[in-house]
Amino acid sequence: MADVATLDPERYLNERVKQYQGWYDRKAVIAKSRYLRMRGFSVLGGALVPVLANIKVEAAIGGYSIMTLVLTAISLLVVVFVSLESVLHYREQWKNYRSTEQFLGHETFRYQTRIGPYAKLDEVAAFRLFVERVEDAIAAENAATLNVMTVAAEPTESQKVGKPPGSAG
């Protein structure tokens, strides 16, 4: 990126801040939708299985009770959705994206109205601080998402083959 002294604040706002804000907003909406759908099905499916298990249905397909097949399918989907959520972390992604999108909006407002940390700064100093805070927020979100996506994939010490719990790597 260009030196802050030669970078046009309006261009930075339009080409960097608003672009990222829109991207974070879209990603937050997608992650929230996926999380709520998966979680909702898991809750409903988990509640339905014991209820359906107590209903007697005599019909069969290929020697298997239709109810057994339905219960097996629902149970399998619940396990798959719960397992996928533990790997994909849509809830954490949603929170990270939304909080960063909101921060960028609030920070832009503070910068443009010269309130908060920008109150007593001249134009150049205020813009430098704004760029620093925006870039720090973007970097922090990237690190948080990377951490969420990789830490869960790593086995705990007690899960490592040949390593007793509490032993060093």
Image (cartoon, grey):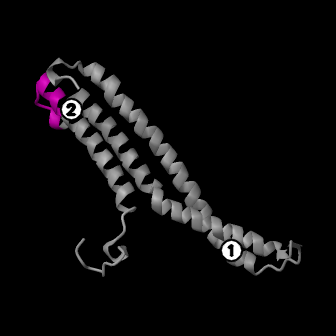
Percent of width and height locating residue 63? 86, 76
Type of residue at label 1? Val
Residue 93, placed above or below residue 130: below
Type of residue at label 2? Phe
Tag shown at residue 140: none
Q: For the image shown, how many numbered marks are present on the structure?
A: 2
Residue at x 58% of width, y 64% of height: 80
Percent of width and height locating residue 69? 76, 71
88 or 40, nearer to the observer: 88
Q: Which badge, 1 or 2, is on the more N-terminal residue?
A: 1
Tag shown at residue 49: 1
Residue segment shown in magenta: 117-130
Percent of width and height locating residue 32? 50, 50
Residue 40: name its quadrant.
bottom right
* Residue 115 shows up from this direction: no
* Residue 17 shows up from this direction: yes
Percent of width and height locating residue 160? 35, 73
Residue position marked by numbered label 2 in the rendering = 130
Residue at x 54% of width, y 49% of height: 33
Residue 56: name its quadrant.
bottom right
Residue 109: name its quadrant.
top left
For the view shown, which residue lies furthest in the front direction? 162
Left or right of 45, for residue 57? right
56 or 149, nearer to the observer: 149
Residue at x 44% of width, y 57% of height: 89
Nearest to viewer (mark 1 / mark 2): 1
